[in-house]
Amino acid sequence: MSLSSANAAGRYVTAPGGYVLLTAVGPDDPVAARRQATFQVVAGLNDRTCFSFRSADGRYLRHASWRLRLNPSDGSALFRGDATFCPQAGQPAGSVLLESSNYPGWFLRHRGDELWVDQFDGSPGFRADGSFLVRPALAD
């Protein structure tokens, strides 16, 4: 699957390097660009009722120092928590907010094109920047 920002049309969660960004990418872009925006959803490494996102090369989306990045698992409890997200209803309807399983009340959100985990402040702006749409995978 691929994740697009609910309030930044055509911008997808991508992992072009170590850090995760929002990037404009679509079905007509080169396959390498589309692969950077494609993840396998697996049972949460820390909580099986939540989710983890794995890239084709086996690395996971995880937060470290509050910034979202793509790293290989080191097998630690901290890594499992950092790489597990629990969905909640986002805004607009049909979107999801992704809460960190090891920091309740902290959610994935974009700040410009960077992705961070921040403490939810209840504001409409935070909810908008933290809402994502689950899309079909941009690459196989």
Image: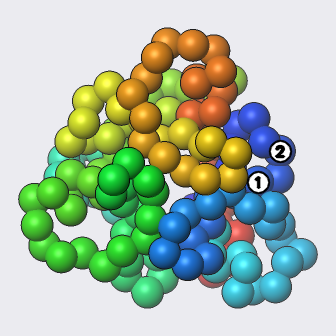
- Which residue carries the number 2 mark? 9
36 versus 119 height, above or below:
below
Residue type marked 2: Ala
Looking at the picture, how far across and down is residue 75, in whole percent? 13, 73
Q: Note whether residue 35 is visible.
A: yes
Q: CA distance from mark 2 to mark 1?
A: 6 Å
Is residue 41 shown above or below 15? above
Q: Residue 124, how many percent across, how many down?
A: 63, 15
Q: Residues within 10 Å of mark 1 (few under 14, many from 20)?
A: some
Residue tagged by mark 1? 11
On the image, the x and y values in percent for residue 72 come to 31, 79
Say which quadrant the C terminus sits in.
bottom right
Where residue 12 sits: x, y (%)? 69, 57
Left or right? Give the position of 12 relative to 8. left
- Determine whether the residue tagged by mark 2 lies in a helix, strand or loop: loop
Q: Are marks 2 and 1 in contact (CB under 8 Å)?
A: yes
- Is disc 2 surrounded by few (<14), some (14 to 19) or many (20+) residues within 10 Å? few
The residue sitting at 44% across, 53% down in the picture is: 67
Residue 37, quarter of the rendered image: bottom right
